[in-house]
Image (tube, rainbow, N blue to C red):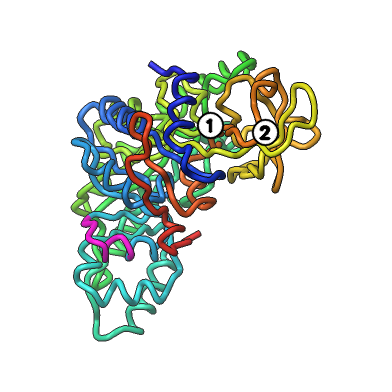
């Protein structure tokens, strides 16, 4: 049971010896979120999305949970770094044109066995072969995952709903590229990825917008039905030409529906571990806010207003208010519409401001998950009312992959 006032008191006590700004992860909430993802997956493994975590200590904590296995990475350089650190199963979720990294991958048997790369275009295959030629000898076999387009097409394709990712949509599209890969020496198709972002990453319960919420739910119901049939057909066709080890789908917002498809063997998820602000708007699940950042009060400009240091950490995606951090604790604070979240100062309005003193902390939730870690080099892991450990983020380890 979430008790915001008690949580705020815990976080303040735990970090009283630390200077703000700072970022924390509540380990009890993190563990509860991990267990809930596993429960929602109904026995299918969760592959943790590293872009949503960006901290090796917390990747390790998630991977220690029964039912979570494997990493979905976001750049090839990151994939190799993780594989060199001993992670045995890393799926690159996006195409790469990093020739130097491909040369390293093809020259190292340990890396080649641990990393699976993503393709959706023959030109990517040519680039990898050119990079292989830059290295010593013919190199190691490259493990390949193909990606299919999951977007919902309406009115004969005149309306498209979904992320613009792979150009491969039909079973014929996927089989043609699979056959091209399979007949190329040094490559092997081992998986299929199909990320339905318009279902997994779009909230269907928007506060104060009931009509919009109903429209989103209707769209998602139609998208799930269309994709389930098409994904099953693609998998059947691909299995005739390649020995698929996995079929990856889903995301935090669609774990149950994606896991229900027999064609899918694993679910990708990561944001659900931290539960950022954008994931408050779902009817299918409720997580616990686990990752927060604290900003100090530095001014009291007047009644009902305080100013905190910095805090202008907008999330990626289509610009809008939903991309701003959420003032979380104490409850009842809101942005000044004239300033919003500022680069070096952020005024906050509300009656709760009158109870805050200079030096007190306001706790925020980032709109997205892992992007918080690009702002901080350490995460302070809170257990109860103490900091159990302070661990480096990717940035803290000197790694800024994107």
Residue drawn at (44%, 45%), measured in percent from left and top? Answer: 149
Q: As displayed, is residue 358 above or below residue 256?
A: below
In the image, 119: left or right of 362? Answer: left
Task: Read off the residue under disc 2.
Answer: 321
Which picture quadrant has residue 83?
Answer: bottom left
Is tag 1's residue or tag 2's residue first in the polypeptide sequence? 1
Q: Position of residue 330 (x, y in %)?
A: 57, 24
Depth check, front residue: 324 or 18: 18
Residue drawn at (26%, 58%), measured in percent from left and top? Answer: 189
Which picture quadrant has residue 264?
Answer: top left
Residue 278 marker? 1
Q: As displayed, is residue 52 above or below residue 201?
A: below
Residue drawn at (55%, 35%), measured in percent from left and top? Answer: 161
In the image, 353: left or right of 73? Answer: right
Q: Position of residue 117 (x, y in %)?
A: 33, 60
Q: Give the quadrant of the N terminus.
A: top left
Q: Position of residue 257 (x, y in %)?
A: 35, 26
Regarding mark 1 in the picture, which secondary structure is present there? helix
Q: As displayed, is residue 56 above or below residue 226?
A: below
The residues bearing labels 1 and 2 have C-alpha atoms spaced at a distance of 11 Å
Depth check, front residue: 192 or 42: 42
> Is residue 162 inside the magenta stretch?
no
Residue 166 marker? none
Crowding at dot 1, Cα within 10 Å, few <14 / some 14-19 / many 20+, comes out as: many
Q: Is disc 1 in contact with disc 2, using a CB cutoff of under 8 Å?
A: no
Q: Which residues are magenta?
A: 81-88
Q: Position of residue 18 (x, y in %)?
A: 48, 44
Whether residue 169 appears in this view of the structure is no
Regarding mark 2 in the picture, which secondary structure is present there? helix
> Is residue 87 inside the magenta stretch?
yes
Whether residue 9 appears in this view of the structure is yes
């Amino acid at each position: 049971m979430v008790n915001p006032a008690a949580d705020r008191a815990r976080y303040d006590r735990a970090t009283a010896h630390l200077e703000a700004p700072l970022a924390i992860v509540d380990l009890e909430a993190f563990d509860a979120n991990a267990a809930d993802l596993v429960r929602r997956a109904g026995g299918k493994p969760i592959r943790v999305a590293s872009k949503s975590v960006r901290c090796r200590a917390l990747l390790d904590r998630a991977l220690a949970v029964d039912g979570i296995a494997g990493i979905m990475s976001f750049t090839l350089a990151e994939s190799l770094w993780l594989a060199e650190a001993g992670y045995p199963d890393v799926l690159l979720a996006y195409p790469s044109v990093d020739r130097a990294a491909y040369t390293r991958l093809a020259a190292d048997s340990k890396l080649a066995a641990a990393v699976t790369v993503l393709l959706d275009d023959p030109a990517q295959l040519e680039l990898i072969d050119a990079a292989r030629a830059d290295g010593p000898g013919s190199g190691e076999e490259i493990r390949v995952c193909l990606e299919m387009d999951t977007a919902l097409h309406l009115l004969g394709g005149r309306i498209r709903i979904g992320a613009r990712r792979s150009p491969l949509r039909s079973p014929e599209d996927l089989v043609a590229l699979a056959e091209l890969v399979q007949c190329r020496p040094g490559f092997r198709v081992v998986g299929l990825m199909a990320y339905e972002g318009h279902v997994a990453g779009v909230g269907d319960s928007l506060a104060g917008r009931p009509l919009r919420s109903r429209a989103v739910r209707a769209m998602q119901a139609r998208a799930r039905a269309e994709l389930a049939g098409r994904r099953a057909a693609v998998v059947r066709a691909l299995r005739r030409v390649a020995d698929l080890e996995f079929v990856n789908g889903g995301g935090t917002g669609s774990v149950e529906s994606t896991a229900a498809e027999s064609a899918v063997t694993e679910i990708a998820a990561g944001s659900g571990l931290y539960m950022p602000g954008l994931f408050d708007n779902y009817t299918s699940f409720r997580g616990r806010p686990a990752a927060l950042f604290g900003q100090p009060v530095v001014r009291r400009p007047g009644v009902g207003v305080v100013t905190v240091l910095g805090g202008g950490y907008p999330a990626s995606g289509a610009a809008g208010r939903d991309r701003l951090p959420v003032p979380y604790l104490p409850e009842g604070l809101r942005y000044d519409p004239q300033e919003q979240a500022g680069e070096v100062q952020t005024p906050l309005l509300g009656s709760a401001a009158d109870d805050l003193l200079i030096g007190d902390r306001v706790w925020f939730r980032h709109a997205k998950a892992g992007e918080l870690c690009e702002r901080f080099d350490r995460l302070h892991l809170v257990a109860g009312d103490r900091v159990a450990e302070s661990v480096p983020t990717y940035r803290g380890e000197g790694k800024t992959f994107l």
